[in-house]
Amino acid sequence: MLDKKRIFIVGIFIFAIILAIMAVWFYREKAGKQNEIVEYTPEEEITDEQMRQTIVSLYFKNQNSLIPEARLIDVKELIQNPYEKIINMLLEGPKNENLQKTIPEGTKINKIEKQGEILILDFSTEFITNHQGGEEQEKLTLQSIVKTVTELTEINAIKIKINGEENKEFQDGKIKFDQIFHREF
């Protein structure tokens, strides 16, 4: 009986030693993995084409309000002169047939100049002569331009010139260009 008791105690002692060795080995294995640098491999590679594209928002008229139209554009097109590219996209009009362009037909950009956070836009006379008029429509035209260019973080307002001249106005005289137009005017 005494021998069975000793064998049982020795067995438990050996089992405890094996358990302790396994615990030390497991701890070292886990600590070693924490110090390893694991390289992240994305599931899907991004193509060069995807890397060069960005989304710009252009604001067009939908009845008597403005709706942004998102356009996917190659970043390289924005590097040279982003303001001219975006204004030209506004001049071209919307892709969505439910939206209408806000800048009058025949309008051209004479010059675009950035002064601090203000973008000075010099348009041809068609900007005022071809405008359908009405204070609400005139506001929508200006808001369309302001909201579109102020999507760029460095621009907070615009100033309008007509053929290089300041202080012009729409034909009905309701809105004058003697002021700086901010996003909410």
Image (tube, helix red, strand yellow):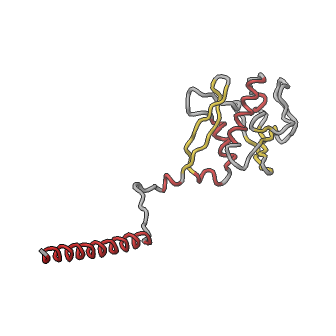
Looking at the image, residue 2 sits to the left or right of residue 42; the answer is left
Residue at 73% of width from left, 25% of height from top? 137
Q: Which of 8 and 92 is in front in this view?
A: 8
Place of residue 6 in the rendered image (x, y in percent of width and height, measured from the top left) = 17, 77
Q: Is residue 120 above or below residue 175?
A: below
> In the image, residue 178 lies at what x, y percent?
87, 36
Occupied quadrant, residue 30: bottom left
The quarter of the displayed image where residue 66 is located: top right
Q: Position of residue 73 (x, y in %)?
A: 56, 46
Residue drawn where x is 64% and y is 22% of the image: 63
x and y percentages locating residue 97 in the rendered image:
56, 28
| Left or right of residue 158: residue 68 | left
| Residue at 13% in and 74% down | 4
The number of numbered badges drawn on the structure is: 0
Tell whether 106 sits left or right of 173: left
| Quarter of the N terminus within the rendering | bottom left
Picture quarter containing residue 70? Answer: top right
Q: Residue furthest front?
A: 1
Q: Is residue 42 above or below residue 177?
A: below
- Residues 57 and 28: in front is 28
- When the figure is inspected, residue 47 is found, relative to residue 36, above or below; the finding is above
Taking depth in this image into account, of 72 and 112 the one nearest to the observer is: 72
Q: Is residue 177 left or right of residue 15?
A: right
Q: Vertical placement of 43 versus 167: above or below?
A: below
Q: Quadrant of the C terminus?
A: top right
